[in-house]
Amino acid sequence: MMSQMPQQAAPAKCPSCAEPLESGDLFCGACGYDLSAVPAAPQDHPTLTMGAAGVGSSGVDWPPPEPESSGKPAAPHLPTDLPGTDSGGTQLPESPHGSPASPPPHGSPVSPASGVRFDRPPEPDEYPLQAPDPRVAASAAETTELPKVCVACRAGRVDDDGYCENCGHAQPRERDHMEQEAGPVAAVSDRGLRHHRNEDAFAVGHTALPDGTPASLAVVCDGVSSATRPDEASMAASRAAVEALQAALEQGTHPQQALHDAIVAASQAVNALAEEPPSAREHTPHQNAPACTIVASVVASGLLVVGWVGDSRVYWVPVDRAAPAARLTEDDSWAAQMVAAGLMSEAEAYADERAHAITGWLGADAYEVEPHTASFKPDRPGVVVVCTDGLWNYAETAEEMSEIVPADAAVRPLHAARVLVGHALDGGGHDNVTVALLPFPAPPQGAGSA
């Protein structure tokens, strides 16, 4: 069974007038504020230390993590020890029914009994319209005064109608290749070489906490191809999540709680897409509701916070490559469940054709969404890699990801994101590819790629 939401508890101070409160108070004695409306402090996972101790305090009056049920604080962990937790602080379930999930019948995208969803519908080996090479897009972005160059022949100019004047090749749609910088954060998304459209989406941003310290954030979503309108689902989820994150951080909400709530907001945005008129459903009566996965990260005041539902990932890559890299998330997938249950090795599970069957997603046909979140305190500078499986399929382990992340990624995140997308395309580009990079610690506002 999936864990339940934690019981609410009265905060230490009144959220309205900041007067001290007694344990068990239901109303503030000073202003009469209804304390039952205040959400509980985050109980996802205690803050973990990456490396040595000695990280300075955050400088923001965030509530401390809830203590363990035994009353003892959790022992420090390495990031590679992260078991994966839900918002109740419990281990990830093997399946909604307590046993490893079974794959659905062949041809069925969702198995209601197991909660497993296959996101690999049959598709042609090639599509006539090739995705743009991000390195070409990079040169075009850096020299905006030059005309657009055809992504097919690399020579002809592109006319106003989107066709090459030399070879006549139709150019990719705007969604096929997207790039964005937001202060020190950058992201790139590409359709890849096999898919007919880009079903990934991202949203990045940076803001300031109430005490003026900077905060960086990135959200990456991967549309479920077996569902209807997966591109709309990923876009709606990423936008809703980043808007909720920015608003909460600017109000001083603890980033772990803010990230949990942002994923819930993203889930509601995807659910709303299923509320379409009956006439729209007549054209696709057998399609599932729009769905996507989500992964996000916040870097703020010495904390690195991650949250996710699905199989997109977050990696930690230190600037000093002599220090170990780490994967900070656990997949909601068939393969991960097989490994967790001890039924297969990681190599065997991910080599299976059912490996990418997801067991968690956002959408109206999903089980009750329980976002997974965790916090870390790195003791050295580095870069946070937030990506879909379109990238990590070509660099699965933390060590492999560390090898392909450019050494200057923390100071040139947009360039590094282009390099990572290029790595996936060079590897075959079998899926949409999206990656966002956040330097740690968050540099002052106004900093960007060199």
Image (tube, helix red, strand yellow):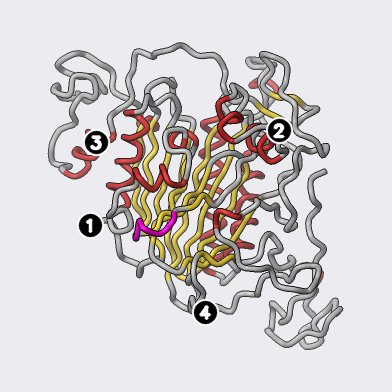
What element does badge 4 sit on?
Answer: loop
Q: Which residue is mark 1?
A: 450
| Residue 332 in view here | yes
Comes first in the chain, label 4 or label 1: 4
Q: Is 272 located above or below residue 259 in the figure?
A: above
Question: From what the image shows, is residue 3 above or below residue 419?
Answer: below
N-terminal-most mark, 2 or 4:
4
**From mark 3 to mark 2, how far is it between C-alphas?**
42 Å
Q: Residue at x 38, y 14 (%)?
A: 127
Q: Is label 3 or label 2 in front?
A: 2
User: In the rendering, at what x and y percent does residue 314 appear?
Assistant: 50, 49
Which is closer to the viewer, label 4 or label 1?
4
Instruction: Identify the residue at image location x=45%, y=27%.
Output: 431
Mark-to-mark CA distance, 4 and 1: 29 Å
Q: Is residue 273 visible?
A: no
Q: Which mark is residue 57?
A: 4
Residue linked to disc 3: 135
Question: Residues under labels 2 and 1: Cα distance?
Answer: 47 Å
Q: Judge by depth and name the residue closer to the eye, 148 or 407.
A: 407
C-alpha distance separating marks 2 and 4? 42 Å
Q: Residue 180: percent from the left, percent from the top?
A: 35, 47
Which residues lie in the magenta part? 320-324
